[in-house]
Structures are given as C-alpha cells and as structure tokens.
Amino acid sequence: MAAARSLPERRRASSQVYVHGTAVRRLEPAQNPPRRHQRYQEQERRQKATYRIRRNQEKALQMDLPYLAVLVAAAVCALYICVNYIHIQSGMTGRMDTIKTLEQQLDTLKAENDALETSINTSVDLDHVYKVATEELGMVYAGKDQVLLYNQTESEYVKQYEDIPEQ
C-alpha cells in the first residue's frame, strides 16, 4: 500500500513524521488551538477593556462643575500674578528713571557748589582781611599767656555752656 501512494502523498506523510534513530516520534503541534470557551472569554475581556478605555476617555473629555471652577480659579490667579508682576515692573522702571534724574541733579548741584566754592576762595583776599582786622578794628593775635589749654577726658567734645577750668 505504501507503493500505491502518490509522490505528493508520500511527501506530506514524510514531512509530518520525523524519524530519529529506530524509534519514531510523533510531532506535536506548536500551539494547542484555543478552545471555544477560552476564545469567548478572551473576546469578552477585550471588549471590557475597550469599554473601560472608552469610558475613561469620555470622562477625561467631560468638564464637570468642580473641574471648571478649579480651572477658572487657576486662570484668575495666573492673570492676577501676571498683572501684579507687570505693575511692579513698571513701578521699578519709573523709580529707576527718577533715581537717574535725581543723580543727574545731584551731579549738577555738586558741580555748581564746587564752582561757587572756588569763586569764593579766589575772591577772598586773606591779606586784605588781616589788614582790615589789625589796622581798622585794632585786633591782635593772642599772646601765649592768653591761651589756656586743658584736657577733658569725660567726653571728646566741648559743651557750649560748660565752665572752662581756671588752670
């Protein structure tokens, strides 16, 4: 009967069976086909997972009242912070401009003061002052016996109405 088989049948039969040594083993299928009950359970599990995913996506897209209230509060807070920041920034810019203007005025006044001091120092003739004081007003330099020196250790300045010690 083996001789009666055609060539394709013999190839099919030989590809199904592998002979190793003298004992012939049967080939086992790589995977057992799932049973009908297991297939239905797998399909139900996939459908439930798909349903859960869809339901979660729909919930995520819905905006309920508390979510909307929190979102509006956050937007108002962000807007308030931005407006305050801009207000503070503009105030600082204004103050910096004021400081710059005041510094320029200070420099101008210092320059005027130095110019006036120089003109005063150059206009006063100390020789003329000495001449008027000694000749016209009769003033003289103090002599050595007229100058009294004293040490006061209590404080480093002299009070205006304090008595000067005799010796």
Image: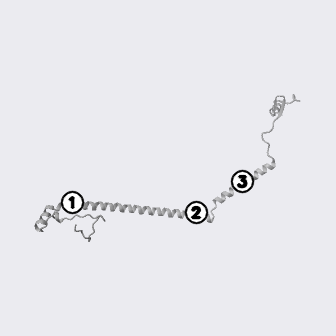
User: Horizontally, is 44 left or right of 119 in the view?
Assistant: right
- SS for tag 1? helix
Q: Are marks 2 and 1 in contact (CB under 8 Å)?
A: no
Q: Residue at x 63, y 64 (%)?
A: 64
Viewer-side residue, 74 vs 41: 74
Among all residues in the image, which is located at the extreme front?
167
In this rendering, the label closer to the viewer, 1 or 3:
1
Amino acid marked by disc 2: Leu
Q: CA distance from mark 3 to mark 2?
A: 30 Å
Q: Position of residue 5 (x, y in %)?
A: 86, 30
Q: Nearer the viewer, residue 14 or 24?
A: 24
| Left or right of residue 158, residue 142 in this image | left
Above or below, comparing residue 52 to residue 76 in the picture: above
The residue at which mark 2 appears reads as 71
For the point 35% across and 60% down, which residue is it? 100
Residue lying furthest left: 135
Q: Quadrant of the N terminus?
A: top right
- Circle 1 residue: 118
Q: Are marks 1 and 3 in contact (CB under 8 Å)?
A: no
Q: Secondary structure at mark 2?
A: helix
User: Horizontal placement of 128 versus 64: left or right?
Assistant: left
Of pointers 1 and 3, the one earlier in the residue sequence: 3
- Residue denoted by label 3: 49
